[in-house]
Image: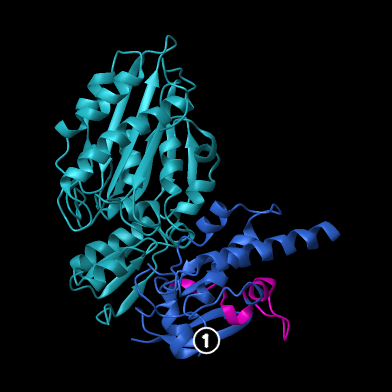
Amino acid sequence: MAFAGVKEFLQPGSGREAVDLLAKLGDRAVVLGGGTFLHGLAARGVLGEVDTFIDLQKAGFSLVKSERSGLAIGATTTFTELAEAEPVRTSLELGAVRDALQYPPPQIRNMATVGGCVASATPLFDLPVAFMALDGSVKALGPRATRDIGLHKFYLDYFEHVLERTELLTEVLLPKLPSGSASAFLKLETNANDLALLNVAVRVTLDESGTCREVRVVVGGGVGKVPVRAVSCEDVLKGQRPTPALLQESGDVVSLDIHPVDDHRASAKYRTAVAKVYVRRALQRALTRLGASLDGHNGQES
Amino acid sequence: MKQIIHLDINGEAQDIAVEPYHTLLQVLRDELGLIGAKKGCDTGGCGCCTVLVNGKAVYSCMVFAMTAQGKTITTVEGLADGATLDPVQQAFIEAGAVQCGYCTCGMIMSAKAYLSSDGSHLPGDLEMRQAIAGNLCRCTGYQKIVDAIRLAASRRMETSAKG
């Protein structure tokens, strides 16, 4: 039995209490958000010698708050709760989050938590890629202080991030973006429960003349140990008025930034080919959300 | 070490001794004999263990029993009203939406959650297929299952129209 070594199930009533437990228990404890990823890890024998679960459901982190600075998402907010939050349902700039939340099946959306998804440090997950395209950051609570860490600096390797063992991810922060911003997300998968073979999130900010002032392109799902920011794709568009030819060029140069894995699920060559198309399509989707007219583009996504 | 927890399952309060690592599926099947929810992949990939927690579909193989305290749990055994089947169960029978039957209870629970939460319109095929996207049928009998959900949805509309 995968978890037979677990002797205690603790449900701290606050983040502070959870951090104290982490300090006391060290590597013997694993923190639970929704717990949906844990079973897969245990089944593969990679969970380690854990004897205590620290479940965060009662720690008070299930909330979505619109603040002047942006959107604050509590760590134990489920995918369903996030999808139902008004800004996520309606905002152009959060389109990538909305898109990403549509892929998992209802059973996962109802259980999986935002904090668990981010803190699992799996480059095959969807929401972190969307959050990175929005310049998201996380709030970490430690024994002595709280710190904010940009997601672009958060991930180190497969299942590794910069948090100390005694730190707890309590919140994801998505900054308010300038007007004229929209984002989009696309995922290649074989079924609804599949981890991404490839996923792409983009964010575009246009000024009043339709010129691209800011752009982010982030690619995940088997293209590196952590999600990759595709700066080459961004450079093609920055300072330009988007055209179908520029979107094509932006997609084509993604191969300069990613180093896809070659595995039983997809070859590196296939992942690269799809990445080129998905970057272009995601940019089209974000620009369509902004109502941008692309010369020679009929507004249909292809 | 086992400890006693209190669960609300199909409207009945239950006191059960569980290990901290026991899943809701283990408790339902092994402790309570509620074997409608099936053990399939046991890692949240196939959907045959689907039950409702506070009305929402979840994989019971992924829910630790300890976290289900204070929540309302509904299994397929709790759908019928005495001898009268739930409209979703009835629709599955009439549409012939069962082949080997292993996925059926999970499919019914996903369909139940979907039809309970989503308005009074007649859903399109894509919408219904998305509702059962987390459930696998190894017999590939999806079309009859979608037919059953459509039948249940249309009856729901007729019932609500009659007021």
Q: Which residue is pictured at 54% across the width and 52% down the height?
A: B126
Q: Is mark 1 on a helix, strand or loop?
A: loop
Residue at the top extreme of this rendering? A209
Q: Which residue is pictured at 39% across the width and 68% down the height?
A: A11
Q: What residue type is labelled 1?
A: Leu
Q: Badge 1 sits on which subunit?
A: B
Q: Where is residue A203 in the image (x, y as percent from the top left)?
A: 36, 29
Task: Report which residue position mark 1 lands on.
Answer: B34
Does residue B80 appear left or right of residue A207 in this picture? right
Q: Position of residue A83 (x, y in %)?
A: 50, 47
Comparing B61 with B155, the one in front is: B155
Residue B73 counted in the magenta span: yes
Q: In which quarter of the image is the C terminus of chain B?
A: bottom right
Does residue A283 appear left or right of residue B53 in this picture? left
Whether B36 is drawn above or below A212: the answer is below
Comparing A62 with B138, the one in front is: B138
Does residue B71 appear left or right of residue B85 in this picture? left
Does residue B89 appear left or right of residue A214 in this picture? right
Comparing B32 with A218, the one in front is: A218
Whether A302 is drawn above or below A39: the answer is above
Q: Position of residue A256 (x, y in %)?
A: 14, 31
The stretch of residues the image draws in magenta is: B67-92
Whether A83 is drawn above or below A87: the answer is below
Residue A156 counted in the magenta span: no
Comparing A30 with B48, the one in front is: B48
Q: In which quarter of the image is the N terminus of chain B?
A: bottom left
Q: Which residue is pictured at 45% across the width and 58% down the height?
A: A105
Instruction: Say whether residue B59 is visible.
Output: yes
Q: Which chain: blue?
A: B
> What colour has chain A?
cyan
Q: Position of residue A194 (x, y in %)?
A: 34, 57
